[in-house]
Image: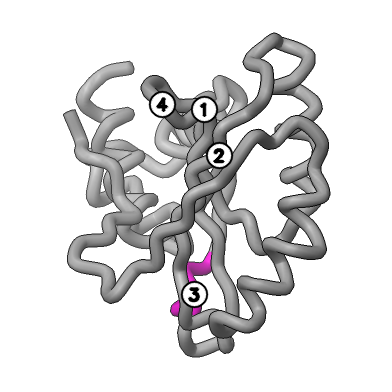
Amino acid sequence: MDTIDRRIISALQQNGRIKLSELSEQVGLSPTPCARRVAMLEEAGVITGYSARVDQAQIGLAVTIFVAVELERQSKDALQAFENAVSKFDQVMECYLMTGSRDILLRVVARDLTDFDRFLEEQLMRVPGIRNTRSSFTLRTMIKRDVLPAR
């Protein structure tokens, strides 16, 4: 990946709907080589897709909760079973395998505390292999970046 690829990625992160002619002008290429580079970045899995950024509160999901999960076992099979189970829960926005005393960290969204309680009781706590959970509710988002640094 060279400087031009990084400029393409940066421009697309700022505006995924940019026209090819504008993108090529921004990065200093003619449209055909620029289109080839974008296609190569997509095929290589560097660019994984395009989407709209949505304000979660505006669509009724005002609460963000981080849930630390400790599993009974940390075997490959146990981790895979947990991942398969929580991947079916729409409220789970992100799931990370962690180091330290907690095995998994989830970022969960909910309408309100009642909605989260329902999710916890009816979905998450029914996943086999969970030893315990610890939830932390966000008060406000201080920094949120959707654009990766262009290094």
Helix, strand or loop for disc 3: loop
**Spatial distance from mark 4 to mark 3, Cα to Cα?**
33 Å
Q: Is residue 82 above or below residue 26?
A: above
Q: Amino acid at mark 2?
A: Val
Magenta residues (range): 52-56
User: Tag 3: Cα neighbours inside 10 Å, few (<14), some, or many (≥20)?
Assistant: few
The residue that appears at 67% across and 17% down in the rendered structure is 73
The residue that appears at 69% across and 36% down in the rendered structure is 130
Q: Amino acid at mark 3?
A: Val
**Spatial distance from mark 3 to mark 1, Cα to Cα?**
29 Å
Q: Quadrant of residue 45?
A: top right
* Residue marked by disc 3: 54
Mark found first going from the N terminus, 3 or 1: 3
* Residue marked by disc 2: 69
Tell me if label 3 and label 1 are in contact, CB under 8 Å. no
Q: Amino acid at mark 1?
A: Asp
| Residue 91 falls within the magenta-colored stretch | no
Nearest the viewer among 25 and 99 is 99
The residue that appears at 74% across and 63% down in the rendered structure is 121
Judged by depth in the image, the label closer to the viewer, 4 or 1, is: 4
User: Tag 2: Cα neighbours inside 10 Å, few (<14), some, or many (≥20)?
Assistant: many
- Quadrant of the rendering where the C terminus is positioned: top left
**Spatial distance from mark 3 to mark 2, Cα to Cα?**
27 Å
Helix, strand or loop for disc 1: loop
**Spatial distance from mark 4 to mark 1, Cα to Cα?**
7 Å
Mark found first going from the N terminus, 3 or 2: 3
* Residue marked by disc 4: 101
The residue that appears at 81% across and 64% down in the rendered structure is 122
Mark found first going from the N terminus, 1 or 2: 2
Q: Quadrant of residue 2?
A: top left
